[in-house]
Image (tube, rainbow, N blue to C red):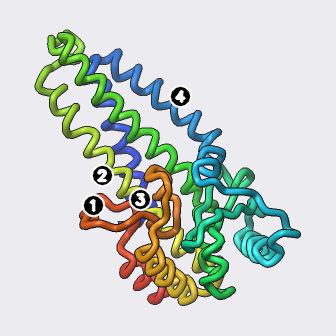
Amino acid sequence: MNNTLKTFILMAALTGLFMVGGQILGGRQGMILALVIALAMNFFAYWNSDKMALAMNKAREVSEAEEPELHQIVAGLAQRAGLPKPRVYIVDNPTPNAFATGRNPEHAAVAVTTGIMQVLNREELEGVLGHELGHIKNRDILISSIAAVMAGAISYLATMAQWAMIFGGGRSDDEGGGNPIAMLVMMIVAPLAASLIQMAISRSREYIADRTGAEICGHPKALASALQKLSTYNKQRPMQVNPASAQMYIVNPLKSGTIAGLFSTHPPMEERIRRLLAM
């Protein structure tokens, strides 16, 4: 299935799950209230996602005088992609990695760790930054922010359902809210389902950014090589980052466990590299 269509279906599923949760909790009025809350939270995420991401990862903006080559690469790639040049940030961390943030191409930023400048050659760095510009071009940061907010809101509804059960919210009403069995399912299943959907959205957007980034930089093999290096380094020396921001990075910065693929924020590295080499 086309990754763009898959994202649309998953986002619709996430929204539907949120509204169903609202209806279970409070009937028709609960569903409407859930929709209003979702819109308000998405609006907040739209305006503040870049500031929160940069602050959370302790990124500092660098001038062209400080990092002339990095600015030159970003400017050239942005021109090729038909995008305004994003702001450039550095994260003081020896582990090589990178991410992009911003609500739209006019308010975007790219951030790289100090480690990535030491590990990658110029073509590989162009591939990584092309990937990040691909996220900006495809508005993936906005999509991921909305998905994260919706998943968090669904978890909040599950908590509300728990308190409603404790304080006698298990009585059914004429509008369909308050069914005790449905509320129990909401408490247990909804947060898990929301997390799975959010992670599936993240994986599908990474594939799209890989392809777009390879087209922007013109070096699919260089991006594939960069991903292999970054994956190896991040496994050997995981970054200490907030788990909420892990999905933003080009490769998973956290220590990998035996977690199943369904619970991963990034697609399998072997498959990402295979698709790039096939280009």
Residue 137 spot, x, y in % from top left = 63, 62
Q: Which is nearer the N-term, disc 3 or disc 1?
A: 3
The amino acid marked with disc number 3 is: Leu
Q: Which of marks 3 and 1 is in front?
A: 1
Cβ atoms under marks 1 and 2 closer than 8 Å: yes
Q: Which is nearer the N-term, disc 1 or disc 4?
A: 4
The crowding category of the residue bearing disc 2, from other C-alpha atoms within 10 Å (few below 14, some 14 to 19, many at least 20), is some
> Can the viewer see residue 84?
no
Image quarter hosting the N terminus:
bottom left
Determine the residue positioned at 61% across, 75% down.
115
Find disc 4 in the rendering and name its residue: 40
Q: Is mark 1 on a helix, strand or loop?
A: helix
Q: What element carries label 2?
A: helix
The image quadrant that residue 105 belongs to is bottom right
The crowding category of the residue bearing disc 3, from other C-alpha atoms within 10 Å (few below 14, some 14 to 19, many at least 20), is few
The image quadrant that residue 70 belongs to is bottom right
Find disc 3 in the rendering and name its residue: 5
Query: In the image, is residue 263 above or below residue 45?
Result: below
Q: Which mark is residue 196?
A: 2
The amino acid marked with disc number 4 is: Ala
Q: Which is nearer the N-term, disc 4 or disc 3?
A: 3
Mark-to-mark CA distance, 1 and 2: 6 Å
Q: Which is nearer the N-term, disc 1 or disc 2?
A: 2
Mark-to-mark CA distance, 3 and 1: 19 Å
Find disc 1 in the rendering and name its residue: 262
Mark-to-mark CA distance, 4 and 3: 25 Å
